[in-house]
Amino acid sequence: MKTLRIAAVASLALAPVALAAPAHAADATVSILHAVPGATVDVYANGKALLTDFKPGTLTDPLMLPEGTYDLKVTAAGAGAGGAAVIEANDVKVPGNANITVVAHLDESGKPVLTPYVNDTSSIAAGKARITVRHTAAAPAVDVRANGQVAFKDLTNPNEAKADLAAGTIKADVVLAGTDTVAIGPADVNLKEGTNTIVYAWGSAADKNLALATQVLTGMHSAPGGVPAGAGDDSSAAARWAAVAGASALAGGLVLAGRRRAAAVR
Amino acid sequence: MTRHRAPSPVPHRTAEPGVAGGSGRSGGARGVAAALAVALLAGLVTFWVTRPSDALSGVPEADSLAPAAAASATAPAPTGAAASQPEARPATQAVASTLPAPTRLTIKRLGIDMPVKPVGVARDGEMALPRTPAEVGWYEFGPRPGDPRGATVLAAHLDMPGYGTGPIAAVEDLRPGDTLVVRSGGTTTRYAVSDVRSIRKSQLDLPTLFARDGAPVLHIVTCGGTFDPEARRYDRNIVVTATPVS
């Protein structure tokens, strides 16, 4: 548990400090994902029940938690606040204004752990979508492929990788690193413009229950840079120059003709 | 011995006036200068009169969009204190039930009846538009007609070399209260114009124009102002704002 606690604190410390600028206590947006196969659990924060009857493969709606330090404990469902911990993480720092997903999952060797991930909610260019992939499965290193091409290489538990791509649907699968041996998928993943789609590989390779879980964060869209709704009209430009030339010739001609007539009369 | 032809005492006016000799020379030169001056003046006047600015002179110029769309920040419905338990649901992608995409824009009073095509973002980061001014582009990443929040954006080219001026140019004549009809497959959404503005491109509030939040609104966008032939750009956008009529 001690190593876990350190990992948890270190992870949360990665949250950009600048985001926690306001002087008043800011809330953090926290979602919780249950990615430990087979166990329905209760989750306690500082001794109080945060979630009960929490099932594998489910994700909570975002929860606003005041910034601060939390002792988190996961027990078997109905075990009570004093029940034996399936997972425990103390002194987990939750920075204000951060967007965090706390994931209960298996480590590479199959032991249940809690990992808090800080989600990237920075703005995304118009027309693009962000994809984040997280290895939260009891499985070795993997490559994540998009439309058959390796997009993220050599990802290991509990690490993540991300990229901003053109919005649209991709066919994603997970292969054992450096091989074509498919571990999960393929699955269609809809990368909606302006969102961060977070895909978790979870479960256990040994128990043959590897799966994908998906979380979508919205609201990071940007407006296009402008509306270039005119390209000129050569025909009207040509007509304009013809009018200019015509008027010049006509006026000049009239003056000359007038003077000539005057001279002839003289 | 060849005899020099005596200069004609009378300027030879049927020849090039500029080479007329004798006493007529200064008068002819003056005539040419006057003709050139008047020609130049006439050319300049024509140049000015036909300048491509404000075909849309009836459209008020503005430096901003309507004070529409509220702040785009959306609090994702916080569940309040840690005491209240958050909802947990399967961590799978929600099957987005979307309304149909717009397919046709009709403005009866102006004789506008144009097909609408979905468009996204061009390589340069600006909104992509159908190449031909005969078609309207709908910004496919934004709200659809009937969506409860945000701005549906339709835009069409004012003009295009080889095509001339497009039908969308007529939107300058829209007045508050005019009806716009957008068809989305079999669904029809009616809008009432609330205003028409000419906005300098450098001042255009793009996040409001493309708002995803706030009251539902339709923005019809084209170009206006002065065309810069070097940059091949107009310096203004014409923005029609209309609200859905229930």
Image (cartoon, coloured by chain):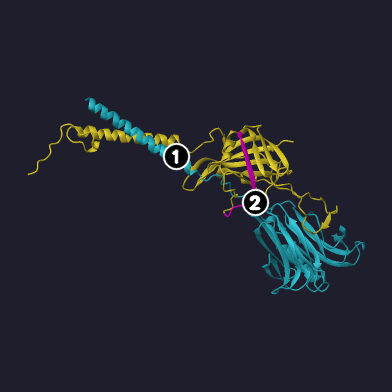
Q: Quadrant of the N terminus of chain A?
A: bottom right
Q: Which chain is yellow?
A: B
Which residue type does callout 1 highlight?
Ala
Image x and y of residue B119, in percent: 63, 50
Please name the residue shown 29% across and 30% down the image: A257
- Which image quadrant is residue A119 in? bottom right
Part of the protein shown in magenta? B110-123
The vertical placement of A6 against B221, above or below, is below
Q: Which residue is mark 1?
A: A239
Image x and y of residue B106, in percent: 65, 38
Secondary structure, mark 2, is loop
Please name the residue shown 47% across and 42% down the image: A235
* Res. B242 visible in picture: yes
Please name the residue shown 72% across and 35% down the image: B245
Q: Which chain is cyan?
A: A
Q: Does residue B117 show up magenta in the picture?
A: yes
| Mark positioned earlier in the residue sequence (1 or 2) | 2
Pick the residue in front: A255 or B91. Answer: A255
Q: Which residue is mark 2?
A: A222
* Res. A16 visible in picture: no
Which residue type does callout 2 highlight?
Ser
The label nearer to you, 1 versus 2, is 1
How far apart are the two marked residues, 1 and 2, measured between alpha carbons? 41 Å
